[in-house]
């Protein structure tokens, strides 16, 4: 019974879709027929092959034509090479940053992206056409290569992209600081110069003989001494004599204290006997005093 209810619900859902819907699934990711952002809104996957594929229309402006790119890039290359002796001793990497910066500042189009690929061809064509207008890069000494006197350098200035504009309060602080410096300079403040003075003598002021005498006096306490401590190695004969003397000293000491050692040995035997019998050490009779 539940399966029948599910089939009826699914059929009702399919029949209730709009008449213009081709499929119940989403068309996300495919360029829809909206004229606001598609160059060919009436294109479909089943369209004839001679129709242009749709492309996205950006808000940066219309597409840049090839002829416009070639003309603009050629003009910029000419301007840059005119200031560099017709690019006789220059490479494309020397002028490419300036050209890209100028292309990015042209309004009504993304010229930096669309025209970047035409810079190489324009540079090669300019060098081929104007290479004979300037002397070659290799000359004999002492003659030097002079810039092209017929080239007119354009009068323009590239703005510094890293320049930081100061706020009004920062400009006021800077102006006040400069004003105070000017007033203090009028009063003579901060204008004190370095005066000549007699500096104390140093070791470098001594003569060569005085340095020798000073060094000799400093080394005199260490004459005949060494910075190393040598090892004292005993000979075999001295070691045998020393061992014989030690043995004699032990024998003499034992002979002089023989009675004391005998008393200690007897008392030690008495203590062991008391421990075996369980007698307290205080009740054991010892011969010596400890």
Image (cartoon, helix red, strand yellow):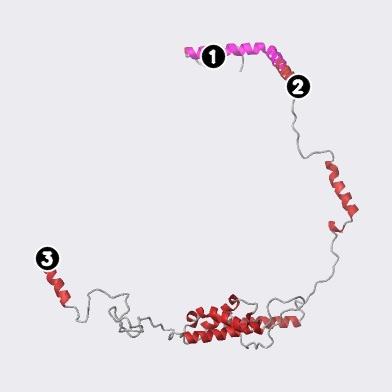
Query: Local crowd at mark 3 within 10 Å, few (<14), some, or many (≥20)?
Result: few
User: In front of the other: label 1 or label 3?
Assistant: 3
Where residue 256 sits: x, y (%)? 70, 13
Q: Residue 259: say if magenta.
A: yes
Where residue 232 sits: x, y (%)? 75, 30
Residue underneath mark 1? 271
Please tell me whether mark 1 sits on a helix, a strand or a loop.
helix
Q: Residue 43: say if magenta.
A: no
Query: Local crowd at mark 1 within 10 Å, few (<14), some, or many (≥20)?
Result: some
Residue contact between numbered discs 2 and 1, judged by CB atoms under 8 Å: no
Residue 164 appears in the figure: no
Q: Is residue 199 above or below residue 133?
A: above
In magenta, the rendered stretch is 248-276
Query: Local crowd at mark 2 within 10 Å, few (<14), some, or many (≥20)?
Result: few
User: Which residue is pictured at 84% across the width and 47% down the height?
Assistant: 218
**Quadrant where the N terminus is found in the figure:** bottom left
**Quadrant where the C terminus is found in the figure:** top right
110 to the left or right of 208: left
Overall secondary structure of the magenta section? helix
Give me the C-alpha separation between circle 2 and circle 3. 117 Å
Q: Earlier in the sequence, mark 2 or mark 1?
A: 2
Residue underneath mark 3? 3
Residue underneath mark 2? 238
């Amino acid at each position: 019974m539940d399966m029948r209810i599910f089939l009826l619900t699914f059929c009702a859902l399919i029949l209730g879709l709009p008449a213009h819907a081709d499929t119940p699934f989403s068309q996300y990711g495919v360029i829809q027929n909206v004229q606001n952002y598609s160059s060919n809104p009436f294109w479909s996957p089943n369209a004839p092959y001679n129709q242009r594929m749709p492309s996205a229309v950006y808000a940066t402006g219309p597409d840049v034509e090839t002829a416009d790119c070639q003309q603009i890039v050629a003009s910029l290359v000419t301007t840059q090479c005119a200031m560099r002796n017709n690019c006789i001793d220059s490479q494309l990497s020397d002028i490419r940053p300036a050209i890209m910066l100028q292309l990015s500042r042209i309004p009504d189009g993304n010229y930096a992206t669309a025209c970047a690929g035409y810079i190489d061809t324009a540079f090669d064509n300019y060098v081929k056409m104007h290479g004979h207008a300037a002397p070659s890069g290799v000359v004999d000494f002492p003659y030097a290569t002079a810039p092209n006197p017929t080239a007119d350098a354009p009068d323009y200035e590239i703005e510094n992209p890293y320049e930081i504009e100061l706020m009004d309060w920062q400009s006021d602080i800077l102006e006040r600081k400069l004003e105070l410096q000017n007033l203090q300079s009028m009063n003579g403040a901060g204008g004190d110069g370095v005066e000549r003075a007699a500096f104390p003598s140093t070791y470098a002021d001594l003569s060569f003989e005085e340095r020798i005498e000073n060094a000799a006096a400093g080394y005199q306490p260490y004459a005949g001494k060494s910075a190393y401590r040598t090892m004292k190695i005993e000979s075999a004969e001295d070691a045998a004599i020393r061992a014989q003397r030690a043995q004699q000293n032990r024998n003499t000491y034992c002979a002089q204290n023989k009675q004391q050692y005998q008393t200690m040995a007897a008392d030690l035997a008495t203590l062991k006997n008391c421990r075996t019998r369980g007698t307290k050490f205080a009740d054991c009779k010892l011969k010596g005093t400890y």
